[in-house]
Image: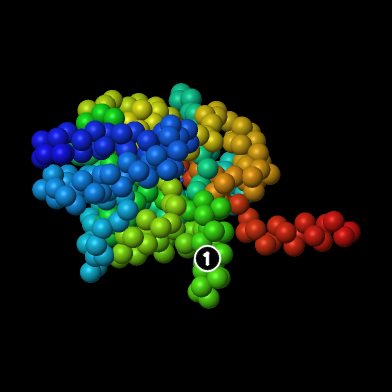
Amino acid sequence: MNKTEAQRRLEELYEQIETHNYHYFVLDQPLISDQEYDALMQELIKLEEQYPELKQSNSPSERVGGEPLPYFEKVQHEIPMLSLGNAFSEPELRDFDRRVRQGLGPAEDVEYVCELKIDGLAVSLRYENGQFVRGATRGDGTTGEDITQNLKTIRSIPLRLKEPVDLEVRGEAYMPKAEFERINELRAEQGLELFANPRNSAAGSLRQLNPKIAAERKLDIFLYGIAQIKGIEVESHSDGLAVLERLGLKTNRERAVVHTVEEMLDFIQHWTENRAKLPYEIDGIVIKVNRYDQQQKLGTTAKSPRWAIAYKFPAEEAVTILTGIEVNV
Ligand SMILES: CC(C)(CNC(=O)c1ccc(Oc2ccccc2)cc1)c1ccc2c(N)nc(N)nc2n1
């Protein structure tokens, strides 16, 4: 194959492999078998070795992890990565709702989006003209670490969006429960110290300077907040999530738009009872005012939005012991 044919074949492979990543890891509906997928990746890696000058910066071959970094660059978040205030009880949720309605004034109707709070690592992804250019940890909300190389190994993060937009999006990188079990079994066999929980395992994987380690671990991501978007008008958080899905980004579908605290409490009750069935760990439920104009009106404190709150589940052990005592009585 000559250089021109190699160039054309490489573009074909970029397109095909990223399409398969989207169907397999975002839609969870693979079009080809793992073996066929691996064959495409092997062909890509071989061609790029033959013609290194033809390799593009956002090639899918970067998903297997390149050379280790000496350190992580610091990243300044132009738009702060806010943290969420917590609520631990129904009265505290009612207080949140009251504060929101007071802040918006009596004439305003308000609707909320209820979402799962994934127990992972908060990250920010930046896309320029549709290309994934940088990924960073939250850090202290203003300064994080550049972990782009490691995030490229997460197959559900598209290297290129379906539209050439500029976007800064926030989400939670996490390790599915099954992957956590698999890795700890491996570590037990190797006599290594076990990870305490999926969250620590995900954080540990993404803080590795050697991206090949992150690539060995099947991490995943759910995106949940648009900090900045150019070229597309969005009026509400639920519209924003639909735009992210249209662009090829992965969001968590277990969400609902509600209008009252009672509906909020129903959503929380449902997931309190059913979270054990989820393939990933959650540590709470996030409630957000849906309309962006109302979010703007409520604003943020230095650290947290006034238009969102996280209801945290009681710690697992406490519930188990209490349940045990009630059963004995
Ligand atoms: C709401 C937000 C804090 C994200 N949003 C932002 O980071 C964010 C940041 C600036 C924004 O706009 C501003 C622009 C300039 C100044 C201030 C805010 C808007 C959203 C958040 C944080 C953690 C979440 C979590 N663990 N799970 C879910 N499901 N959702 C979550 N949502």
Going 26% across and 58% down the picture, which residue do you hit?
A: 66
Residue 140 visible to the viewer: no
Is the residue marked 1 within 8 Å of ligand 1, measured from its CB? no
Q: Quadrant of residue 224?
A: top left
Mark 1 crowd level (few <14, some 14–19, many ≥20, 10 Å Cα): few
Residue marked by disc 1: 186
Residue 286 visible to the viewer: yes
Where is residue 124 drawn, in percent x and y?
A: 32, 48
Nearer to me, 26 or 298: 26
Going 30% across and 65% down the picture, which residue do you hit?
A: 209
Is 274 situated left or right of 182 in this image? right
Say above or below: 235 vs 318.
above
Give the secondary structure at mark 1. Answer: helix
Q: Residue furthest front?
A: 1
Ligand 1 occupies quarter: top left
Which quarter shows the N terminus? top left
